[in-house]
Amino acid sequence: MSAIEKGSTVLVTGANGFIASHIVDQLIQSGYKVRGTVRTEAKGKWVQDFFDNKHGKDKLELEVVPDMAEKGAFDHAVKGCSGVIHVATNISFSKNPNEVIPSVIAGVTHTLEAANKEPSVKRFVFTSSSTAATNPVPDKEFNIDESSWNQVAIDKAWADPPYTEADRAWNVYGASKTQGEQAVWKYVKESKPHFVCNTVLPNANFGPILDKSQDASTAGWIRDVFTQGFAPQLEQIPPQWFVNVQDTARLHVAALIDSDINSERIFAFAEPYNWNSVLAAMRKARPDKKVPEDRKDNSKDLSKVLPKARAKEILKKHFGQNGFIGLEESIKANIQNL
């Protein structure tokens, strides 16, 4: 029994984004209609065209919300929706925490407030991040669990200026996701909304890019390495866990519709990778293509993600999958059209 009826409308914020567009796809495939928000009409054009062509013209409608940090930003968009998935975030990668973190927290809060004013909303899902739990720490064994929070990123992000450290932007991003998710649970505790709330924490998302105009987030890393080789900023990205973006989207759908998932943090971590394992997967998928040579640094992510079993259980229950989609299949899908 689904917690929200099939055929009802789900609000997805930031619908033109890489993860959000896959969530839209999985929701429609699961029998729901979607109202997506975009910042401008131009950003939404490919989204509307893509899903109209794939699923028909009555499955997706878009609404322009120029600034999620503006109070009441989502009040109109949420009208009549049975569920809300808040994906939109600040991905400017500014090194100044004041330019990122307050807007993320405001966006989360305003979406929750809008949902709480709309009686039809039964379920709410927030797209958090692996960086809300931890930064990648190569070659160190440690456990990640439901109580893990990335205090390191918060401390480094809010350290005194000047904002010039090389890793400051990543820590600002990590702190925004940490404090954004913490704002969700604070709101739930203090405001006691009438809907159920869950969060999903994906690590680096690889897999199919729906439209070439997307910046494609972490899947853009794979695309760029395959087509251009290693830029300095890519070489600096440490080994960590990955997840196929379709699995991330499926976990969002399950968190939205499964009445047995209640106030949970769902960890979307498939398996650890480093650049050499990615390059090996590229060579296997496309033996016709010259792929960059292996990196000298072969360090690995040795962390243990204790809640991974719960996510696998959810994928099995709702989608019949025996675990997460693997790295080789994900890399193949990521570069199939290049």
Image (cartoon, rainbow, N blue to C red):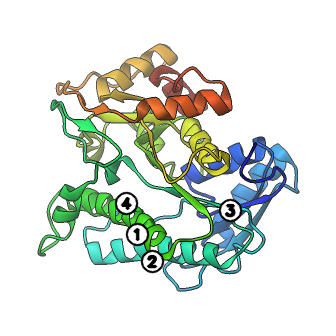
Q: Which mark is nearer the camera, 2 or 3?
A: 3
**Disc on the earlier residue, 2 or 1:** 2
What's under tag 2, amino acid-wise?
Ala
Residue 106 is tagged as: 2
Q: Secondary structure at mark 3?
A: loop
* Nearest to the observer: residue 240 or residue 141: 141
State how far apart marks 3 and 1 are (Cα): 19 Å
Q: Residues within 10 Å of mark 2 (few under 14, many from 20)?
A: some
What's under tag 3, amino acid-wise?
Lys
What's under tag 1, amino acid-wise?
Lys
Q: Which residue is found at the position 62% from the left and 69% from the top?
A: 194
State how far apart marks 2 and 4 are (Cα): 12 Å
The answer to whether 183 appears left or right of 297 in the picture is: right
State how far apart marks 2 and 1 are (Cα): 13 Å
**Disc on the earlier residue, 1 or 4:** 4
What's under tag 4, amino acid-wise?
Lys
Residue 122 is tagged as: 3
Residue 177 is tagged as: 4
* Nearest to the observer: residue 91 or residue 32: 32
**Disc on the earlier residue, 2 or 4:** 2
For the residues labelled 1 and 4, say whether their Cβ atoms are less than 8 Å apart. no
Q: Residue 271, image x and y in percent?
A: 39, 27
Q: Secondary structure at mark 2?
A: helix
For the residues labelled 2 and 3, say whether their Cβ atoms are less than 8 Å apart. no
State how far apart marks 3 and 4 are (Cα): 24 Å
**Disc on the earlier residue, 2 or 3:** 2
Q: Which mark is nearer the camera, 1 or 4?
A: 1
Q: Secondary structure at mark 1?
A: helix
